[in-house]
Structures are given as structure tokens and as C-alpha cells.
Amino acid sequence: MLRIESITKIFGGLKALDEVSFTISAGEITGIIGPNGAGKTTLFNIVTGIYSPTSGKVFYEGKDITGFPPEKLAGLSMVRTFQGIELFGRMTVLENVMVGLHTKSRSGIIASAFKLPGHVREERRIRERASSWLEFAGLADLANTEAANLPFGKGRLLEIARAMAIEPHIILMDEPAAGLNSRETSDLADLIKKIKESGITVALVEHDMDLVMEICDRIVVLNLGHKLAEGSPREIQEDEKVITAYLGED
């Protein structure tokens, strides 16, 4: 589904990524791990059009998407969440998810301003669809709560539900477990598994190794801008190069 081909990124004199290549298969959960400064988030920023690579290509479902802006990628059913939760605090939980669905809205300014019948019907469908995504994420009972009043863990689930409302083929998550306690991390793991079961491909950058080893089908390890290893969770756990990168040599 996603092919990273010889991606290099240089900031001034710093080579953040150096000829990184790997693929992400449809229907799998792929974890991208590595010590701080390995280039993980830089890679996500290139895939999702925030940065342009110095060299290399990104292919999505066979199409060269190198340098495509995020809004164009959303139209191609690729979405992303970030390390920092970005919600509309004064909107309700339901309204936050409705915002995601409005990317598919066809009503224009005039129809919206005058509440023409087509707009009213479309708004009703959007509300119903948003409610179903809240149910999917386990947030249905919080639909009318202002997003600013959510606990941090629920805010993370809401961010993912809003991204899912676009009905993506692939979702990229940048450190989704950051700041979560053990209960919240367990809820997150359950949600990511449900996303996979629904047929959506998941790629995540993550530091929580317990979470990564539990949910990922394959893992890519970056270190100092290079791809260090790639394989199943068991293969990665037993890889001497990975152990050395994380723990240092004896």
C-alpha cells in the first residue's frame, strides 16, 4: 500500500534520513521505532507532505505522491494524527468528528447559509455517521461533552475517531500512546486492533515497546537516519543490532 523508496532528508548540514526504503502492506499494522533522533517523525512528515525529501520517492497504492500536501492526501484516503492532540476545544465531541466528515461535504456556501433541503439532509447524514464513529471509538456517551473537558486519553481516542471519519485506506499515527497511562494505552491498543479488523492499514511511530510488540505485524527500526532492521516483533526483539542501538554495547 505504501512504498518508501530511498528517502533522504538533509537539514542544512544534518542528514536526518539517509536512503531509507521499506514497504507497508495493506491490512497490516506496521510499527516504526528507534531511539530519539532516529528520524521517525521526519519520515512521517515526508510521507504526509509536510516536508519534501531531499531525494527519494513515496508511492501510495502505486501512485507517486512525493510532495503532495496533506489536504490532497486526505482526498486520497490517507490521514495522520500527531504527537500533540489538536482538537476544537469549544466544540462538542460529536462536532469534532463531524468536522472530519465535512471534508466529504458537497453543500456550498449558499446551501449552507440558507439551509436548503439538500444541505439539511446532508447535515443529518453527517451527524449520523459521526455518531457511528464515536460508537466505534467507545466515545458515544461523551458525544455532547465539550472536547476541552475530556481527559487526555479520551482526547486521543477522539482525535483518532475524527481521522477515521474520513474513511481512510491508511492511517498514520505519530506516538499515539504518548502521555497515556496503562489503562488508556490498553484502550488505545483495542481501538487500533479494531481499525485493522475493519480493513484499514495502520502505520505508527511509537516509543511504548509493550504496545508495539502487542499490536504490530511488522516493525521497522530506524537509527541515526538509517534503516537498522525490519521484521516481525520476535525478530526485532532478538536482533543484536537493535538491542545495541537501544541499550548500547556490553
Image (cartoon, rainbow, N blue to C red):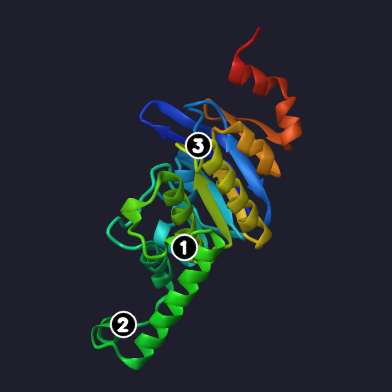
The image quadrant of residue 51 is top left
- Label 1: which residue? 141
Q: Which residue shows up at 45% across the image and 56% down it?
A: 158
Which tag, 1 or 2, sits closer to the chain's start? 2
Rendered image: mark on residue 184: none
Query: Would you place residue 29 above or below residue 129 in this image?
Result: above
- Label 2: which residue? 108
Under circle 1, the secondary element is helix
The image position of residue 218, as x and y in percent, is 69, 42
Residue density around tag 1, few if under 14, some if 14–19, many if 20 or more, within 10 Å: few
- Label 3: which residue? 181
Quarter containing the N terminus: bottom right
Which tag, 2 or 3, sits closer to the chain's start? 2
> In the picture provided, is 236 more to the left or to the right than 180?
right
Under circle 3, the secondary element is loop
Confirm whether residue 143 shows in the render.
yes
Q: Which residue shows up at 39% across the image and 61% down it?
A: 93
The image quadrant of residue 54 is top left
Q: Which residue shows up at 41% across the image and 64% down it?
A: 143
> In the picture provided, is 69 more to the left or to the right than 224?
left
Task: Report, in whole angstroms, how far the alpha carbon at label 2 lies from the one at label 3.
Answer: 43 Å
The image position of residue 120, as x and y in percent, is 36, 86
Task: Report, in whole angstroms, how far the alpha carbon at label 1 lies from the one at label 2.
Answer: 32 Å
Front residue of this view, candidates 140 and 95:
140
Under circle 2, the secondary element is loop
